[in-house]
Amino acid sequence: MNKLADVGVVLLLIAVVVYLTRISGYFLGQRLRHIGRLRPVLEVLPGCAMMALIVPAVVHGSLVEFTALVFVITVMWRQDNIVFATFGGIVILFIGEPAFVWMQSNFS
């Protein structure tokens, strides 16, 4: 698959995992709300799913991928604008990766 298809598949899978964890947490929370210690666990499940997808990409990723991640985290932390953060991260990946490959091939 090409890079655009990979990004699309990953975004789709992230959306599905987050949706399923949210909806399952809601339904489980309704059934198990009398168990107070379980509620915090159900609330952090989407974050855990995101980390399971992000951490391997950062560990095995390139400098461009790490830069995109830092950009997204910074924008979300400073402005809390998910649209700008996502769009900016995708732009960094699409512009940065070919530039990074070009620089490696021409200056190595």
Image (tube, grey):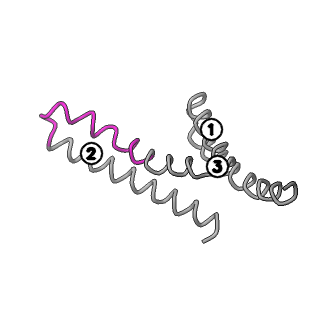
Q: Amino acid at mark 2?
A: Gly
Is 35 positioned to the left or the right of 7 in the image? left
Residue 5 image offset from top left, x and y in percent: 59, 67
Q: Looking at this view, name the residue that lies furthest to the bottom.
A: 1
Q: Distance of mark 1 from mark 2, alpha carbons?
A: 29 Å
Q: Which residues are magenta?
A: 32-50
Q: Nearer the viewer, residue 12 or 96?
A: 96
The residue that appears at 45% across and 54% down in the rendered structure is 15
Residue placed under numbered mark 1 in the picture:
70
Q: Secondary structure at mark 3?
A: helix
Q: Is residue 33 magenta?
A: yes
Label 1 sits on a secondary structure element that is helix
Question: To which residue does mark 3 refer?
Answer: 65
Q: First in sequence: mark 1 or mark 2?
A: 2
What residue is shown at x 75% (from left), y 54% (from top)?
Answer: 95
76 on left or right of 18 = right
- Within 10 Å of the Cα at label 1, are there few (<14), some (14-19), or many (20+) other Cα atoms? few
Q: Is residue 95 left or right of residue 54?
A: right
Q: Which mark is residue 25?
A: 2
| Magenta region, main secondary structure | helix
Residue appearing at x 71%, y 56% in the figure: 94
The percent position of residue 79, horizontal first and vertical second, equals 60, 30
Mark pair 3, 1: CA separation: 9 Å
